[in-house]
Amino acid sequence: MIGKKVWAIAEGYIPSGSTGPKPDFESHDTLCVLNTSDQTANLEVTIYFEDKDPVGPYKMSVPPQRTKHFRFNEFKDPEEVPRDTDYASKIVSDIPVVIQYTRLDSRQAENAIFTTIAYS
């Protein structure tokens, strides 16, 4: 089994503007999770801000031997992740997983995407 149980993403920002059609080209941040184990991975995500208390946990799961992508834009419970606001996140899993972070910024017609492995 590969991966770690605790991950951090220091960068987070969801632009409110988009130029492309939804949902494919809507500006978004994505949490990409790889679970190579034979068990379901249960995750809790906490969101941190510059000027207010953390929010969470957001709970999600990834089936065994699967990958799953979660858009921060779609996090609703306990509250939506605000747009046009810097944030960071901590991901805790009950089993080792691999975490990657991706952003699509489509505020301009020339889309920009970047990705990075999270810190474990």
Image: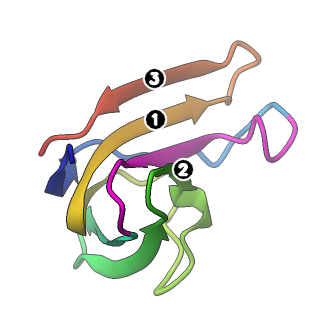
Q: Secondary structure at mark 1?
A: strand
- Residue 103 position, x and y percent, is 50, 35
**Tags 2 and 3 touching, CB below 8 Å:** no
Q: Secondary structure at mark 3?
A: strand
> Does residue 70 lie above or below 58 as drawn?
above
Q: Quadrant location of residue 114?
A: top left
According to the picture, the residue beneath numbered tag 1 turns out to be 102
- Residue 78 position, x and y percent, is 46, 87
> Does residue 26 lie above or below 35 as drawn?
above
Which numbered marker is on residue 69? 2
According to the picture, the residue beneath numbered tag 3 turns out to be 114
Residue numbers of the magenta segment: 21-39
- Residue 47 position, x and y percent, is 30, 67
Closer-to-camera residue (14/4): 4
Q: Quadrant location of residue 49?
A: bottom left
Q: Nearer the viewer, mark 1 or mark 2?
A: 2
- Residue 27 position, x and y percent, is 64, 40
Which numbered marker is on residue 37? none
